[in-house]
Amino acid sequence: MMRANFLKLLYPLAGIAIILIAWHLYVVLLRVPTVVLPGPLQVSAATTTHAKILLEESWVTTLECIYGFALALGLGIPIAVVMTYSRVTNLMFYPLLVASQSIPKVAVAPILLVWFGTGIESKLAMAFVIAFFPIVVDTATGLRSTSPELLELARSLQCSRLQTFFKIQLPSALPSIFSGAKIAVTLAVIGAVIGEFIGSNEGLGNLLLTANSQLNTPLAWAALVVLSVLGMILYGAVVLAERIMMPWAPDGAHKL
Amino acid sequence: MNANGANHDAGQANAGQASARPAFGRLVNVAKTFDTGSQRVTAVKDVSLAFGQGDLISLLGPSGCGKTTVLKMMGGLIPASGGTLELAGQAITGPYPGVGVVFQAPTLMPWRTVLGNVLFPMEVLGKNDRSAKKRAEELLALVGLSGFEHAYPRQLSGGMQQRVALCRAIVHEPSILLMDEPFGALDELTRLEMNDLLLNIRRVTGATVAFVTHSISEAIYLSDRVFVFSKRPAVIALELDVDIPYPRSQQTRFLQRFTELEKQASIALGVVK
Protein backbone atom coordinates (compact mmCIF):
# COMPACT_ATOMS: atom_id res chain seq x y z
CA MET A 1 0.00 0.00 0.00
CA MET A 2 2.73 2.44 1.06
CA ARG A 3 4.80 1.33 -1.91
CA ALA A 4 1.91 1.89 -4.30
CA ASN A 5 1.34 5.41 -2.96
CA PHE A 6 5.01 6.18 -3.22
CA LEU A 7 5.07 5.05 -6.85
CA LYS A 8 1.97 7.08 -7.62
CA LEU A 9 3.81 10.17 -6.41
CA LEU A 10 7.05 9.18 -8.09
CA TYR A 11 5.66 8.90 -11.63
CA PRO A 12 4.46 12.50 -12.07
CA LEU A 13 7.65 13.79 -10.39
CA ALA A 14 9.72 11.78 -12.84
CA GLY A 15 7.62 13.21 -15.68
CA ILE A 16 8.29 16.75 -14.51
CA ALA A 17 11.99 16.03 -14.14
CA ILE A 18 12.22 14.72 -17.68
CA ILE A 19 10.53 17.81 -19.10
CA LEU A 20 12.75 20.17 -17.05
CA ILE A 21 15.89 18.39 -18.21
CA ALA A 22 14.77 18.43 -21.86
CA TRP A 23 13.91 22.12 -21.56
CA HIS A 24 17.27 22.89 -19.99
CA LEU A 25 19.21 20.95 -22.65
CA TYR A 26 17.22 22.58 -25.45
CA VAL A 27 17.95 26.09 -24.18
CA VAL A 28 21.65 25.43 -23.46
CA LEU A 29 22.54 23.33 -26.50
CA LEU A 30 20.74 25.52 -29.05
CA ARG A 31 21.77 28.75 -27.25
CA VAL A 32 18.24 30.09 -27.22
CA PRO A 33 18.29 33.76 -26.16
CA THR A 34 16.84 34.32 -22.69
CA VAL A 35 14.40 36.92 -24.05
CA VAL A 36 12.85 34.26 -26.23
CA LEU A 37 12.91 31.36 -23.80
CA PRO A 38 14.64 31.34 -20.41
CA GLY A 39 15.83 27.98 -19.10
CA PRO A 40 14.34 26.40 -15.98
CA LEU A 41 17.30 27.56 -13.89
CA GLN A 42 16.80 31.18 -14.95
CA VAL A 43 13.09 30.95 -14.19
CA SER A 44 13.74 29.56 -10.72
CA ALA A 45 16.39 32.25 -10.14
CA ALA A 46 13.87 34.92 -11.16
CA THR A 47 11.33 33.35 -8.81
CA THR A 48 13.64 33.62 -5.81
CA THR A 49 14.92 37.08 -6.73
CA HIS A 50 11.42 38.46 -7.11
CA ALA A 51 9.85 36.29 -4.42
CA LYS A 52 8.46 39.25 -2.49
CA ILE A 53 6.72 40.94 -5.40
CA LEU A 54 5.47 37.57 -6.72
CA LEU A 55 3.92 36.81 -3.34
CA GLU A 56 2.32 40.24 -3.06
CA GLU A 57 0.87 40.08 -6.55
CA SER A 58 -0.36 36.51 -6.10
CA TRP A 59 -2.20 37.57 -2.97
CA VAL A 60 -4.14 40.13 -5.05
CA THR A 61 -4.96 37.55 -7.72
CA THR A 62 -5.88 34.96 -5.09
CA LEU A 63 -8.39 37.33 -3.52
CA GLU A 64 -9.91 38.13 -6.92
CA CYS A 65 -10.28 34.42 -7.63
CA ILE A 66 -11.77 33.57 -4.24
CA TYR A 67 -14.22 36.46 -4.27
CA GLY A 68 -15.29 35.76 -7.85
CA PHE A 69 -15.64 32.05 -7.15
CA ALA A 70 -17.55 32.63 -3.92
CA LEU A 71 -19.89 35.01 -5.74
CA ALA A 72 -20.41 32.43 -8.49
CA LEU A 73 -21.30 29.82 -5.85
CA GLY A 74 -23.45 32.19 -3.84
CA LEU A 75 -25.50 33.29 -6.85
CA GLY A 76 -25.16 30.22 -9.07
CA ILE A 77 -26.59 27.67 -6.64
CA PRO A 78 -29.72 29.67 -5.71
CA ILE A 79 -30.35 30.48 -9.38
CA ALA A 80 -30.07 26.80 -10.25
CA VAL A 81 -32.50 26.00 -7.44
CA VAL A 82 -35.05 28.54 -8.67
CA MET A 83 -34.70 27.36 -12.27
CA THR A 84 -35.15 23.75 -11.24
CA TYR A 85 -38.27 24.24 -9.15
CA SER A 86 -39.98 27.04 -11.06
CA ARG A 87 -41.01 25.88 -14.50
CA VAL A 88 -41.84 29.41 -15.64
CA THR A 89 -38.46 30.80 -14.61
CA ASN A 90 -36.79 27.87 -16.30
CA LEU A 91 -38.68 28.40 -19.56
CA MET A 92 -38.04 32.14 -19.54
CA PHE A 93 -34.39 32.29 -18.57
CA TYR A 94 -32.67 28.96 -19.22
CA PRO A 95 -32.38 29.43 -23.01
CA LEU A 96 -31.12 32.94 -22.38
CA LEU A 97 -28.52 31.64 -19.95
CA VAL A 98 -27.29 29.06 -22.45
CA ALA A 99 -27.25 31.62 -25.28
CA SER A 100 -25.26 34.04 -23.12
CA GLN A 101 -22.48 31.49 -23.05
CA SER A 102 -21.82 31.96 -26.76
CA ILE A 103 -20.52 35.46 -25.95
CA PRO A 104 -16.73 35.26 -25.69
CA LYS A 105 -15.98 36.18 -22.08
CA VAL A 106 -12.93 38.24 -23.03
CA ALA A 107 -15.25 40.56 -24.98
CA VAL A 108 -17.10 41.37 -21.76
CA ALA A 109 -13.97 42.42 -19.90
CA PRO A 110 -13.69 46.00 -21.27
CA ILE A 111 -17.34 46.60 -20.37
CA LEU A 112 -16.76 45.34 -16.83
CA LEU A 113 -13.78 47.68 -16.64
CA VAL A 114 -16.06 50.62 -17.49
CA TRP A 115 -18.58 49.53 -14.89
CA PHE A 116 -16.31 48.58 -12.01
CA GLY A 117 -13.07 50.48 -12.61
CA THR A 118 -9.50 49.25 -12.45
CA GLY A 119 -9.73 48.02 -8.87
CA ILE A 120 -10.36 44.50 -7.62
CA GLU A 121 -14.10 44.73 -8.44
CA SER A 122 -13.77 44.42 -12.22
CA LYS A 123 -11.44 41.41 -11.79
CA LEU A 124 -13.70 39.53 -9.43
CA ALA A 125 -16.61 40.38 -11.72
CA MET A 126 -14.70 38.78 -14.59
CA ALA A 127 -13.88 35.72 -12.48
CA PHE A 128 -17.55 35.51 -11.52
CA VAL A 129 -18.85 35.81 -15.10
CA ILE A 130 -16.66 32.97 -16.27
CA ALA A 131 -17.10 30.68 -13.23
CA PHE A 132 -20.84 31.14 -12.90
CA PHE A 133 -22.12 28.99 -15.75
CA PRO A 134 -20.70 25.55 -14.84
CA ILE A 135 -21.98 25.99 -11.29
CA VAL A 136 -25.53 26.75 -12.45
CA VAL A 137 -25.60 23.95 -15.00
CA ASP A 138 -24.09 21.27 -12.75
CA THR A 139 -26.22 22.24 -9.75
CA ALA A 140 -29.37 22.10 -11.87
CA THR A 141 -28.34 18.73 -13.29
CA GLY A 142 -27.67 17.41 -9.80
CA LEU A 143 -31.00 18.62 -8.45
CA ARG A 144 -32.85 17.08 -11.38
CA SER A 145 -31.16 13.72 -10.99
CA THR A 146 -32.58 13.00 -7.53
CA SER A 147 -33.78 9.40 -7.42
CA PRO A 148 -37.54 9.29 -8.08
CA GLU A 149 -37.88 6.55 -5.47
CA LEU A 150 -36.36 8.78 -2.80
CA LEU A 151 -38.85 11.48 -3.75
CA GLU A 152 -41.62 8.92 -3.50
CA LEU A 153 -40.34 7.92 -0.07
CA ALA A 154 -40.45 11.57 0.94
CA ARG A 155 -43.99 11.83 -0.32
CA SER A 156 -45.11 8.71 1.53
CA LEU A 157 -43.70 10.22 4.72
CA GLN A 158 -45.42 13.52 3.93
CA CYS A 159 -42.16 15.47 4.00
CA SER A 160 -42.59 19.21 3.60
CA ARG A 161 -41.09 20.88 0.56
CA LEU A 162 -38.23 22.25 2.64
CA GLN A 163 -37.56 18.87 4.24
CA THR A 164 -37.51 17.23 0.83
CA PHE A 165 -35.14 19.87 -0.49
CA PHE A 166 -32.67 19.97 2.39
CA LYS A 167 -32.76 16.31 3.37
CA ILE A 168 -32.95 14.71 -0.07
CA GLN A 169 -32.51 16.92 -3.12
CA LEU A 170 -29.61 19.11 -2.00
CA PRO A 171 -27.46 16.26 -0.65
CA SER A 172 -28.27 14.27 -3.81
CA ALA A 173 -26.97 17.18 -5.88
CA LEU A 174 -23.80 17.66 -3.85
CA PRO A 175 -21.54 15.50 -6.06
CA SER A 176 -22.67 17.45 -9.15
CA ILE A 177 -22.28 20.78 -7.37
CA PHE A 178 -18.71 19.87 -6.53
CA SER A 179 -17.86 18.78 -10.05
CA GLY A 180 -19.18 22.16 -11.22
CA ALA A 181 -17.21 23.93 -8.51
CA LYS A 182 -13.98 22.19 -9.53
CA ILE A 183 -14.34 23.44 -13.09
CA ALA A 184 -15.47 26.86 -11.88
CA VAL A 185 -12.48 27.45 -9.60
CA THR A 186 -9.99 26.91 -12.42
CA LEU A 187 -12.07 29.17 -14.65
CA ALA A 188 -12.09 31.82 -11.92
CA VAL A 189 -8.29 32.00 -12.15
CA ILE A 190 -8.53 32.51 -15.91
CA GLY A 191 -11.19 35.19 -15.36
CA ALA A 192 -9.08 37.06 -12.84
CA VAL A 193 -6.06 37.06 -15.16
CA ILE A 194 -8.13 38.24 -18.13
CA GLY A 195 -9.44 41.04 -15.92
CA GLU A 196 -5.90 42.00 -14.97
CA PHE A 197 -4.77 41.95 -18.60
CA ILE A 198 -7.51 44.35 -19.64
CA GLY A 199 -6.90 46.95 -17.01
CA SER A 200 -5.06 46.73 -13.74
CA ASN A 201 -1.97 47.89 -11.95
CA GLU A 202 -1.63 44.87 -9.70
CA GLY A 203 -1.94 41.11 -9.68
CA LEU A 204 0.02 38.30 -11.34
CA GLY A 205 -1.54 38.98 -14.74
CA ASN A 206 -0.41 42.58 -14.58
CA LEU A 207 3.05 41.52 -13.42
CA LEU A 208 3.27 39.11 -16.34
CA LEU A 209 2.34 41.81 -18.83
CA THR A 210 4.72 44.33 -17.32
CA ALA A 211 7.62 41.87 -17.24
CA ASN A 212 6.91 40.93 -20.84
CA SER A 213 6.93 44.53 -22.02
CA GLN A 214 10.24 45.10 -20.23
CA LEU A 215 11.61 42.00 -21.98
CA ASN A 216 12.13 40.46 -18.53
CA THR A 217 11.09 37.05 -19.80
CA PRO A 218 12.38 35.07 -16.78
CA LEU A 219 10.06 37.10 -14.51
CA ALA A 220 7.15 36.60 -16.89
CA TRP A 221 7.77 32.87 -16.73
CA ALA A 222 8.09 33.01 -12.97
CA ALA A 223 4.69 34.73 -12.81
CA LEU A 224 3.30 31.98 -15.02
CA VAL A 225 4.65 29.27 -12.74
CA VAL A 226 3.24 30.96 -9.64
CA LEU A 227 -0.08 31.36 -11.43
CA SER A 228 -0.29 27.64 -12.15
CA VAL A 229 0.65 26.83 -8.55
CA LEU A 230 -2.11 29.19 -7.43
CA GLY A 231 -4.59 27.38 -9.68
CA MET A 232 -3.57 24.02 -8.25
CA ILE A 233 -3.87 25.24 -4.66
CA LEU A 234 -7.36 26.62 -5.24
CA TYR A 235 -8.42 23.42 -6.98
CA GLY A 236 -6.96 21.38 -4.13
CA ALA A 237 -8.93 23.47 -1.65
CA VAL A 238 -12.17 22.60 -3.43
CA VAL A 239 -11.22 18.90 -3.47
CA LEU A 240 -10.47 19.12 0.25
CA ALA A 241 -13.85 20.74 0.92
CA GLU A 242 -15.45 17.96 -1.09
CA ARG A 243 -13.77 15.31 1.02
CA ILE A 244 -14.86 17.00 4.22
CA MET A 245 -18.45 17.51 3.11
CA MET A 246 -18.87 14.15 1.39
CA PRO A 247 -17.08 11.59 3.54
CA TRP A 248 -19.53 9.04 2.19
CA ALA A 249 -18.49 9.33 -1.45
CA PRO A 250 -16.53 6.47 -3.01
CA ASP A 251 -12.81 7.23 -3.25
CA GLY A 252 -12.95 7.51 -7.03
CA ALA A 253 -15.12 10.61 -6.77
CA HIS A 254 -12.31 12.56 -5.17
CA LYS A 255 -9.88 11.81 -7.96
CA LEU A 256 -8.12 14.85 -9.35
CA MET B 1 -42.09 -6.05 20.26
CA ASN B 2 -42.52 -9.72 21.03
CA ALA B 3 -45.98 -9.40 22.52
CA ASN B 4 -47.52 -8.96 19.11
CA GLY B 5 -45.79 -11.97 17.70
CA ALA B 6 -47.48 -14.43 20.03
CA ASN B 7 -50.93 -13.08 19.21
CA HIS B 8 -50.14 -13.20 15.59
CA ASP B 9 -49.17 -16.85 15.56
CA ALA B 10 -52.45 -17.71 17.26
CA GLY B 11 -54.30 -15.71 14.63
CA GLN B 12 -52.67 -17.62 11.84
CA ALA B 13 -54.53 -20.84 12.62
CA ASN B 14 -57.62 -19.50 10.88
CA ALA B 15 -55.84 -17.64 8.12
CA GLY B 16 -57.90 -19.64 5.69
CA GLN B 17 -61.06 -17.94 6.90
CA ALA B 18 -59.54 -14.46 6.70
CA SER B 19 -62.48 -13.32 4.59
CA ALA B 20 -64.78 -13.92 7.56
CA ARG B 21 -62.82 -11.48 9.72
CA PRO B 22 -63.62 -7.77 9.58
CA ALA B 23 -61.53 -6.25 6.79
CA PHE B 24 -58.69 -3.93 7.79
CA GLY B 25 -58.03 -2.83 4.26
CA ARG B 26 -60.49 -2.81 1.41
CA LEU B 27 -60.31 -1.89 -2.28
CA VAL B 28 -63.62 -1.70 -4.14
CA ASN B 29 -63.76 -1.50 -7.96
CA VAL B 30 -60.50 0.42 -8.09
CA ALA B 31 -59.49 1.64 -11.54
CA LYS B 32 -56.65 3.75 -12.90
CA THR B 33 -56.23 5.38 -16.29
CA PHE B 34 -53.20 7.44 -17.25
CA ASP B 35 -53.39 10.30 -19.71
CA THR B 36 -50.23 10.30 -21.75
CA GLY B 37 -51.04 13.35 -23.82
CA SER B 38 -52.31 11.74 -27.00
CA GLN B 39 -53.81 8.57 -25.57
CA ARG B 40 -55.46 7.19 -22.46
CA VAL B 41 -53.99 4.02 -21.04
CA THR B 42 -56.04 1.91 -18.68
CA ALA B 43 -53.55 0.38 -16.28
CA VAL B 44 -56.04 -0.99 -13.78
CA LYS B 45 -59.55 -1.87 -14.91
CA ASP B 46 -61.37 -3.19 -11.88
CA VAL B 47 -59.69 -4.45 -8.73
CA SER B 48 -61.51 -5.35 -5.54
CA LEU B 49 -59.78 -6.98 -2.62
CA ALA B 50 -59.86 -7.09 1.17
CA PHE B 51 -57.44 -8.14 3.87
CA GLY B 52 -57.28 -8.31 7.64
CA GLN B 53 -54.92 -6.62 10.08
CA GLY B 54 -51.63 -8.47 10.27
CA ASP B 55 -52.21 -10.23 6.96
CA LEU B 56 -49.48 -10.63 4.40
CA ILE B 57 -50.99 -10.40 0.95
CA SER B 58 -49.26 -10.68 -2.39
CA LEU B 59 -50.20 -9.03 -5.64
CA LEU B 60 -48.90 -11.50 -8.22
CA GLY B 61 -48.89 -10.81 -11.93
CA PRO B 62 -46.85 -10.40 -15.12
CA SER B 63 -44.58 -7.39 -15.58
CA GLY B 64 -46.44 -4.21 -16.43
CA CYS B 65 -49.83 -5.60 -15.40
CA GLY B 66 -50.64 -2.71 -13.08
CA LYS B 67 -49.94 -4.38 -9.73
CA THR B 68 -47.42 -1.71 -8.78
CA THR B 69 -50.01 0.93 -9.68
CA VAL B 70 -52.45 -0.72 -7.28
CA LEU B 71 -49.78 -0.75 -4.57
CA LYS B 72 -49.07 2.95 -5.08
CA MET B 73 -52.77 3.72 -4.85
CA MET B 74 -52.89 1.77 -1.59
CA GLY B 75 -50.15 4.03 -0.29
CA GLY B 76 -51.99 7.15 -1.44
CA LEU B 77 -49.03 8.00 -3.68
CA ILE B 78 -51.19 8.24 -6.80
CA PRO B 79 -54.93 8.90 -6.87
CA ALA B 80 -57.35 6.28 -8.17
CA SER B 81 -59.43 7.14 -11.23
CA GLY B 82 -62.37 5.14 -9.93
CA GLY B 83 -63.49 3.05 -6.99
CA THR B 84 -62.67 3.43 -3.32
CA LEU B 85 -59.77 2.42 -1.10
CA GLU B 86 -59.84 2.32 2.67
CA LEU B 87 -57.50 1.32 5.45
CA ALA B 88 -58.50 0.98 9.10
CA GLY B 89 -61.85 2.60 8.37
CA GLN B 90 -60.29 5.65 6.69
CA ALA B 91 -60.66 6.41 2.99
CA ILE B 92 -57.30 6.72 1.22
CA THR B 93 -57.20 9.92 -0.81
CA GLY B 94 -53.56 10.90 -0.57
CA PRO B 95 -50.40 10.14 1.39
CA TYR B 96 -51.18 9.33 5.01
CA PRO B 97 -49.07 8.69 8.08
CA GLY B 98 -48.37 5.07 8.77
CA VAL B 99 -47.14 3.82 5.43
CA GLY B 100 -43.84 2.05 5.00
CA VAL B 101 -42.47 1.48 1.50
CA VAL B 102 -39.74 -0.76 0.13
CA PHE B 103 -38.79 -0.46 -3.53
CA GLN B 104 -37.07 -2.86 -5.88
CA ALA B 105 -33.80 -0.96 -5.45
CA PRO B 106 -32.72 -0.22 -1.87
CA THR B 107 -32.72 3.56 -2.61
CA LEU B 108 -30.78 4.40 0.50
CA MET B 109 -29.32 7.86 0.94
CA PRO B 110 -25.62 7.41 0.23
CA TRP B 111 -24.74 10.39 2.43
CA ARG B 112 -26.28 8.84 5.54
CA THR B 113 -24.96 5.97 7.58
CA VAL B 114 -27.00 2.79 7.95
CA LEU B 115 -28.45 4.05 11.23
CA GLY B 116 -29.10 7.50 9.73
CA ASN B 117 -31.01 5.90 6.87
CA VAL B 118 -33.14 3.78 9.19
CA LEU B 119 -33.90 6.81 11.36
CA PHE B 120 -34.90 9.02 8.43
CA PRO B 121 -38.68 8.47 8.85
CA MET B 122 -38.44 9.20 12.58
CA GLU B 123 -36.54 12.40 11.83
CA VAL B 124 -39.16 13.58 9.36
CA LEU B 125 -41.97 12.67 11.73
CA GLY B 126 -40.25 14.55 14.56
CA LYS B 127 -39.89 11.42 16.68
CA ASN B 128 -36.15 10.98 16.50
CA ASP B 129 -35.52 10.41 20.20
CA ARG B 130 -33.52 7.88 22.16
CA SER B 131 -36.20 5.20 21.96
CA ALA B 132 -36.29 5.60 18.17
CA LYS B 133 -32.57 4.96 18.05
CA LYS B 134 -33.00 1.92 20.27
CA ARG B 135 -35.74 0.57 18.03
CA ALA B 136 -33.64 1.17 14.92
CA GLU B 137 -30.77 -0.74 16.50
CA GLU B 138 -33.10 -3.59 17.47
CA LEU B 139 -34.42 -3.81 13.92
CA LEU B 140 -30.91 -3.81 12.48
CA ALA B 141 -30.03 -6.62 14.89
CA LEU B 142 -33.14 -8.50 13.78
CA VAL B 143 -31.98 -8.41 10.14
CA GLY B 144 -28.44 -9.37 11.11
CA LEU B 145 -26.79 -6.00 10.62
CA SER B 146 -25.53 -5.34 14.13
CA GLY B 147 -22.17 -3.64 13.93
CA PHE B 148 -22.95 -1.97 10.59
CA GLU B 149 -24.82 0.99 12.13
CA HIS B 150 -22.14 3.49 11.19
CA ALA B 151 -21.22 2.05 7.80
CA TYR B 152 -22.19 3.90 4.64
CA PRO B 153 -24.52 2.15 2.16
CA ARG B 154 -21.82 1.80 -0.50
CA GLN B 155 -19.88 -0.43 1.89
CA LEU B 156 -22.74 -2.96 1.96
CA SER B 157 -23.82 -5.64 -0.53
CA GLY B 158 -27.14 -5.33 -2.39
CA GLY B 159 -28.87 -7.78 -0.04
CA MET B 160 -27.60 -5.95 3.03
CA GLN B 161 -28.73 -2.61 1.60
CA GLN B 162 -32.19 -4.02 1.02
CA ARG B 163 -32.30 -5.17 4.65
CA VAL B 164 -31.51 -1.61 5.71
CA ALA B 165 -34.34 -0.39 3.45
CA LEU B 166 -36.65 -2.88 5.15
CA CYS B 167 -35.72 -1.54 8.59
CA ARG B 168 -36.28 2.02 7.36
CA ALA B 169 -39.75 1.03 6.13
CA ILE B 170 -40.90 -0.34 9.49
CA VAL B 171 -39.02 1.81 12.00
CA HIS B 172 -42.02 4.13 12.47
CA GLU B 173 -44.38 1.15 12.98
CA PRO B 174 -46.50 1.81 9.91
CA SER B 175 -50.02 0.40 9.81
CA ILE B 176 -49.19 -1.07 6.41
CA LEU B 177 -45.93 -2.06 4.76
CA LEU B 178 -45.94 -1.78 0.97
CA MET B 179 -43.26 -3.75 -0.84
CA ASP B 180 -42.75 -3.34 -4.57
CA GLU B 181 -40.81 -6.36 -5.88
CA PRO B 182 -38.30 -5.77 -3.10
CA PHE B 183 -36.25 -8.89 -3.73
CA GLY B 184 -36.54 -8.94 -7.51
CA ALA B 185 -33.03 -7.60 -8.06
CA LEU B 186 -31.35 -10.08 -5.74
CA ASP B 187 -29.82 -13.42 -6.63
CA GLU B 188 -31.92 -16.52 -5.92
CA LEU B 189 -30.18 -17.61 -2.70
CA THR B 190 -30.22 -14.13 -1.20
CA ARG B 191 -33.84 -13.88 -2.18
CA LEU B 192 -34.79 -17.07 -0.30
CA GLU B 193 -32.91 -15.77 2.71
CA MET B 194 -34.76 -12.43 2.49
CA ASN B 195 -38.10 -14.27 2.28
CA ASP B 196 -37.42 -15.96 5.62
CA LEU B 197 -36.18 -12.68 7.04
CA LEU B 198 -39.41 -10.95 6.04
CA LEU B 199 -41.54 -13.71 7.59
CA ASN B 200 -39.53 -13.40 10.78
CA ILE B 201 -39.91 -9.62 10.90
CA ARG B 202 -43.59 -9.96 10.27
CA ARG B 203 -43.89 -12.55 13.05
CA VAL B 204 -42.09 -10.28 15.50
CA THR B 205 -43.74 -6.98 14.57
CA GLY B 206 -47.19 -8.18 13.49
CA ALA B 207 -46.99 -5.84 10.49
CA THR B 208 -49.64 -5.86 7.76
CA VAL B 209 -47.84 -6.33 4.46
CA ALA B 210 -48.83 -5.89 0.81
CA PHE B 211 -46.20 -7.48 -1.38
CA VAL B 212 -45.87 -7.10 -5.15
CA THR B 213 -44.02 -9.84 -6.99
CA HIS B 214 -43.93 -11.72 -10.29
CA SER B 215 -42.57 -14.86 -8.67
CA ILE B 216 -45.29 -17.46 -8.13
CA SER B 217 -43.43 -19.43 -5.48
CA GLU B 218 -42.35 -16.29 -3.60
CA ALA B 219 -45.96 -15.10 -3.45
CA ILE B 220 -47.24 -18.41 -2.11
CA TYR B 221 -44.35 -18.94 0.28
CA LEU B 222 -44.84 -15.58 1.97
CA SER B 223 -48.53 -14.88 1.90
CA ASP B 224 -51.75 -15.52 3.76
CA ARG B 225 -53.46 -14.70 0.54
CA VAL B 226 -52.39 -14.19 -3.07
CA PHE B 227 -54.23 -12.00 -5.55
CA VAL B 228 -53.35 -13.10 -9.05
CA PHE B 229 -53.56 -10.25 -11.57
CA SER B 230 -54.46 -10.57 -15.22
CA LYS B 231 -52.48 -8.87 -17.96
CA ARG B 232 -53.06 -5.11 -18.32
CA PRO B 233 -55.63 -3.65 -17.81
CA ALA B 234 -55.58 -5.36 -14.45
CA VAL B 235 -58.43 -7.31 -12.98
CA ILE B 236 -58.06 -9.99 -10.34
CA ALA B 237 -57.93 -13.33 -12.10
CA LEU B 238 -57.75 -15.46 -8.99
CA GLU B 239 -57.80 -15.06 -5.23
CA LEU B 240 -55.81 -17.76 -3.55
CA ASP B 241 -55.98 -18.55 0.19
CA VAL B 242 -52.70 -20.10 1.17
CA ASP B 243 -53.85 -22.64 3.76
CA ILE B 244 -50.36 -23.70 4.76
CA PRO B 245 -49.75 -22.79 8.42
CA TYR B 246 -46.92 -20.57 9.62
CA PRO B 247 -44.18 -20.76 10.62
CA ARG B 248 -43.00 -21.80 7.18
CA SER B 249 -39.53 -22.84 6.20
CA GLN B 250 -37.83 -23.63 2.92
CA GLN B 251 -39.13 -27.21 3.44
CA THR B 252 -42.62 -25.80 2.86
CA ARG B 253 -41.83 -25.34 -0.81
CA PHE B 254 -41.73 -29.12 -1.25
CA LEU B 255 -45.17 -29.80 0.24
CA GLN B 256 -47.74 -31.24 -2.13
CA ARG B 257 -50.16 -28.47 -1.20
CA PHE B 258 -47.56 -25.87 -2.13
CA THR B 259 -47.19 -27.39 -5.57
CA GLU B 260 -50.97 -27.50 -6.01
CA LEU B 261 -51.25 -23.82 -5.18
CA GLU B 262 -48.41 -23.02 -7.56
CA LYS B 263 -50.25 -24.87 -10.30
CA GLN B 264 -53.50 -22.99 -9.64
CA ALA B 265 -51.66 -19.65 -9.80
CA SER B 266 -49.84 -20.73 -12.97
CA ILE B 267 -53.13 -21.61 -14.65
CA ALA B 268 -54.63 -18.26 -13.62
CA LEU B 269 -51.59 -16.49 -15.06
CA GLY B 270 -51.90 -18.47 -18.27
CA VAL B 271 -48.43 -19.96 -17.83
CA VAL B 272 -49.88 -23.47 -17.68
CA LYS B 273 -52.73 -24.24 -20.06
Image: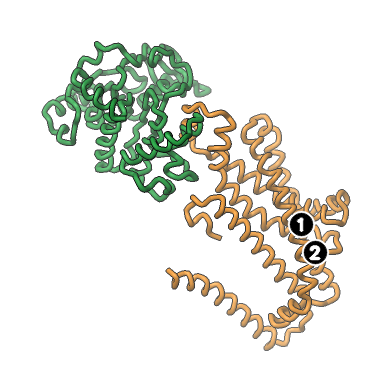
Visual hue assigned to chain A: orange
* Residue A43 % position (x, y): 72, 78
Count neighbours of disc 1 (C-alpha within 10 A) and say few if under 14, some if 14 to 19, many if 20 or more. Answer: many
Left or right: residue B3 versus residue A20 is left
Circle 2: residue type: Gly
User: Element type at marker 2?
Assistant: loop
Quadrant of res A234:
bottom right
Q: CA distance from mark 1 to mark 2?
A: 9 Å
Residue at coordinates 26% horizontally, 27% vertically from top-left?
A: B5
Left or right: residue B134 versus residue A75 is left
The residue that disc 2 covers is A203
Left or right: residue A222 versus residue B264 is right
Chain that bears disc 1: A
**Which chain is drawn using green?**
B
Q: Quadrant of the N terminus of chain A?
A: bottom left
Circle 1: residue type: Glu
Query: Quick check: B110 above or below B43?
Result: below
Residue at coordinates 56% horizontally, 53% vertically from top-left?
A: A244
Q: Quadrant of the C terminus of chain A?
A: bottom right
The residue that disc 1 covers is A64
The answer to whether marks 1 and 2 mark residues whose Cβ atoms lie closer than 8 Å is yes
Query: Quick check: A237 above or below A26?
Result: above
Residue at the far left in the pictured view: B256
Query: Quick check: A122 above or below B221?
Result: below
* Residue A7 % position (x, y): 48, 73
Residue at the far front in the pictured view: B130
Give the mark nearer the N terminus: 1 vs 2.
Answer: 1
User: Element type at marker 1?
Assistant: helix
Comparing A106 with B77, the one in front is B77
